[in-house]
Image (cartoon, coloured by chain):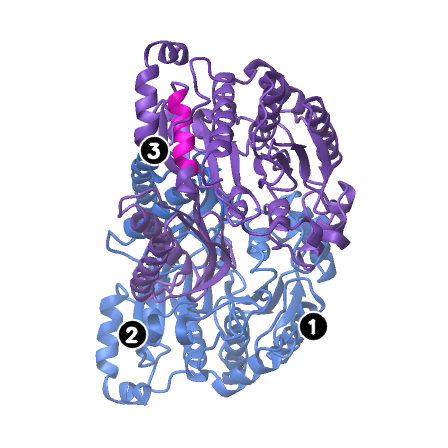
Chain colours: A purple, B blue
């Protein structure tokens, strides 16, 4: 309803807004009757895909390289062909659906997502963007719209197991990585072969930096911000950097009955104060940074022994790498005081690090304008989760579109996004792709 | 040196003190030349016993029902026979060495300890009291001293696995208990058979309440209080009550990247604040109570997932049951506030409870007088660890004698008590046994 009211009443305002906010680029395709996807069909496709690997709780367990994954991929490839796309599987196992543009010299505009899930996952994380991208292509075909740029719908393989498919494109998957085991029981190498890739030709799947005109990914937010603020579309500013550390706290193990409270070097007490302090430090400065202690083990781990050692995880996520480093330094500094007070020592072993990946500001503006042009409300926000887009950002201007997740729940069978929001997202994706196609810089 | 000075210079003072502090009982056997054990021999025996099951770190792994346990028991029975004791094994597998008294109508005075160890244990927890008791009997024989009461030196089986031997005496070992597996790989029932007991006749090993004149156990402190205060002997006031709970903290699991800090129901954060709060509550009132969180698990337990559930252990130990209950109530009350602040709930499942066992105040006085009569310094203290004495206290007046543990270390190969302190302890044991023998109430 809001959309229709808007297009009827506020068209001139939209034109002014678009020009004003995008630094001079209007979105000419957003006319009196903007091109819209078939939201009903898209949501039906999502429901159909969720049959492959459906679990007992209303979600799916469609882990990469499983039989269900293969079945889901076959289903998606069928949709791609029905949408008039030319389907190929690259050496890395990613699925590509290509649609020619009017100017063969142009670089492709790439858009898509993934369809693999975590174990006991939901039906929206990945499928919304993947099937949304196919829906965009199908809509363009039905409306007889030909872009200048070739369009490539991509379904990346094994996003949940470490954005493997997109890292193949950037050349970041090593021979060692191929030997890593996955939730499917197969190694990554075996999995790539299983889904139709060719591990001996991985380099053929690489894309050079600058070789794409743009990348756009529609995805569910996986957090509760949009829903809480009753907003329609998240304009993603970038994918946060992630730091993981194993924090080892060493005290002295002793008999919990005979060792007086003032004579203890209790690593568990120190770990507790550390966990509380991480929360305090992370929330002590403005911003949307997050910090989490998600895993902990106390040694020896008996009710009647004062732990002499605790190992816990620390995760920090933030879009600004310098700010993340500052937070980690503050945490280390405060931990020193905890160590002094409890007779323990802290040490930190980095176990994972991914740099922040910023979305292209021009693409961000297109996403925002597209949403507003469709009468949708927006919010600029970082993505706290990793996405294939973070690797694609190395190849060209990248952007992401978020739609609300009910209750912010994700990686769960309870994950849910309303059909209306899914359709909104696909419409913004369509509009953004057209805006990139029309952009003088693309 | 201190001892000789004392006996020379302060004999009249001792007499006055003994009368004054023991409510009218002097210790007549503490004359100008008190009867003393052969400390050198006792320490040599401890060193010999430590050969059975010795580990690579200087301690022993002589878990109950193992071959090493059986070898150690054979060694101890040899010492008993050499000390002139009549050796039997009861149906529960406990070793008894009996020495007749001059008055066959008197109830026996029982004293002893255990020789089984924890895995990777030390050489003093148990052996000091067991071999110390044998040394007392040997000394009495050598000095030609006959007590009025029969004396029974006892070596309880499987103290470390749950004071099994002493619980056989009080009838607390059930048929179900016999099926429990132990560190030896055998069930308790199989273990009792292995060491010469008879599981079909367990009731024959029971002793009725009131059937003993007293029980005295010499043991290492297993804490660092005596050493820290440079004191010789701990006069044990009782064995603390122990409460164990599994504390379950429930929040909501969520994506650690996409869930804003102010939108979390982080069970790990709540568990951290709980652990810190337990420490604060337990140390907020005077006394020697202890509280420990020794085991913790976060679910699902991944660095990138906010824990939706944490289960941790809570242990409280205190000699005064009412005070322990008060502490637990305060902890529960404070946890409510933590739950409110973090969006989590706390629940408590009791997993173990043992009531405090108070030492007989008359026996405490005898221990104190005996130590002072030998020129040794003393401190009244609870036993934070469980001991066979807590069950024996149900059968008659019980007491315990602690000697210092270097660094308070126990259940470790590093466990150590100085030879001088071991000898002191055995001398106090001897004196206390004689005092009970001479007491008008025994």
**The disc label shown at residue A24, or none:** 3
Which quadrant holds residue A336?
A: bottom left
**Subunit that carries the residue with mark 3:** A
Is the magenta region chiefly helix, strand or loop? helix
Q: Is residue A278 visible?
A: yes
Q: Kindly report which numbered mark, 2 or 1, lies closer to the viewer in this rendering.
A: 2
**Subunit that carries the residue with mark 2:** B
Label 1, on which residue?
B71
Dot 3 crowding, Cα within 10 Å, few <14, some 14–19, many 20+: few
**Subunit that carries the residue with mark 1:** B
Asked whether, in this view, residue A161 is left or right of residue A257, the answer is right
Between B386 and B349, the one lying in front of the other is B349
Find out whether residue A372 is within the magenta segment. yes
Which quadrant holds residue B44?
A: bottom right
Secondary element at image label 3: loop
Q: What is the spatial separation of the Cα atoms under label 3 and label 2, in whole angstroms?
A: 81 Å
Q: Earlier in the sequence, mark 2 or mark 1?
A: 1
Circle 3/circle 2 CB separation < 8 Å: no
Asked whether, in this view, residue B148 is left or right of residue B198, the answer is left
Label 2, on which residue?
B229
Q: What is the spatial separation of the Cα atoms under label 2 and label 1, in whole angstroms?
A: 37 Å
Which quadrant holds residue A151?
A: top right
Q: Is residue A159 above or below residue A272?
A: above
Q: Magenta stretch: give its range.
A: A363-373
**The disc label shown at residue A438, or none:** none
Q: What is the spatial separation of the Cα atoms under label 1 and label 3, in whole angstroms?
A: 92 Å
Dot 1 crowding, Cα within 10 Å, few <14, some 14–19, many 20+: some
Q: Is residue B255 above or below residue B426?
A: above
């Amino acid at each position: 309803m809001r959309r229709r009211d808007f297009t009827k009443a506020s068209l001139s305002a939209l034109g002014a807004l678009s020009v004003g906010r995008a630094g001079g680029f209007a979105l000419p395709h957003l006319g009196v009757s903007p091109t819209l996807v078939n939201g009903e069909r898209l949501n039906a496709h999502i429901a159909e895909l969720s049959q492959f690997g459906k679990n007992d709780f209303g979600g799916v367990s469609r882990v990469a390289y499983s039989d269900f994954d293969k079945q889901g991929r076959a289903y998606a490839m069928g949709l791609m062909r029905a949408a008039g796309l030319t389907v190929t599987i690259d050496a890395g196992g990613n699925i590509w659906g290509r649609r020619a543009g009017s100017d063969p010299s142009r670089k492709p505009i790439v858009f898509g997502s993934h369809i693999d899930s975590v174990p006991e996952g939901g039906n929206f994380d990945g499928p919304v963007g993947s099937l949304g991208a196919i829906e965009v292509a199908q809509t363009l075909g039905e409306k007889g719209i030909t872009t200048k740029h070739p369009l490539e719908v991509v379904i990346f393989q094994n996003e949940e197991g470490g954005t493997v498919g997109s890292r193949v494109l950037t050349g970041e998957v090593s021979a060692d990585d191929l030997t890593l085991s996955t939730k499917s029981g197969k190694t990554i190498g075996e999995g790539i072969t299983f889904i139709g890739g060719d591990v001996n030709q991985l380099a053929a799947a690489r894309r050079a930096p600058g070789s794409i005109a743009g990348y756009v990914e529609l995805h569910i937010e996986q957090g509760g911000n949009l829903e809480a603020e009753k907003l329609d579309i998240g304009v993603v500013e970038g994918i946060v950097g992630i730091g993981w550390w194993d924090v080892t706290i060493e005290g002295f193990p002793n008999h919990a009955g005979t060792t007086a409270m003032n004579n203890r070097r209790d690593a568990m007490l120190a770990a507790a104060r550390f966990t509380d302090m991480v929360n305090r430090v992370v929330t002590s400065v403005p911003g949307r940074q997050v910090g989490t202690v998600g895993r902990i083990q106390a040694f020896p781990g008996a009710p009647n022994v004062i732990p002499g050692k605790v190992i816990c995880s620390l995760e920090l996520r933030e879009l600004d790498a310098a700010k993340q480093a500052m937070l980690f330094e503050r945490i280390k500094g405060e931990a020193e005081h905890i160590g002094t007070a409890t007779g323990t020592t802290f040490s930190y072993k980095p176990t994972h690090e991914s740099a922040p990946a910023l979305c292209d500001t021009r693409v961000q503006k297109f996403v925002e304008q597209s949403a507003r042009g469709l009468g949708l409300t927006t919010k600029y926000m970082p993505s706290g989760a990793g996405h294939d887009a973070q690797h694609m950002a190395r190849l060209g201007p990248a952007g992401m579109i978020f739609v609300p997740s009910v209750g912010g729940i994700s990686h769960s069978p309870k994950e849910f996004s309303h059909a209306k929001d899914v359709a909104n997202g696909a419409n913004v994706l369509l509009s953004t792709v057209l805006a990139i196609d029309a952009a003088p810089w693309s």
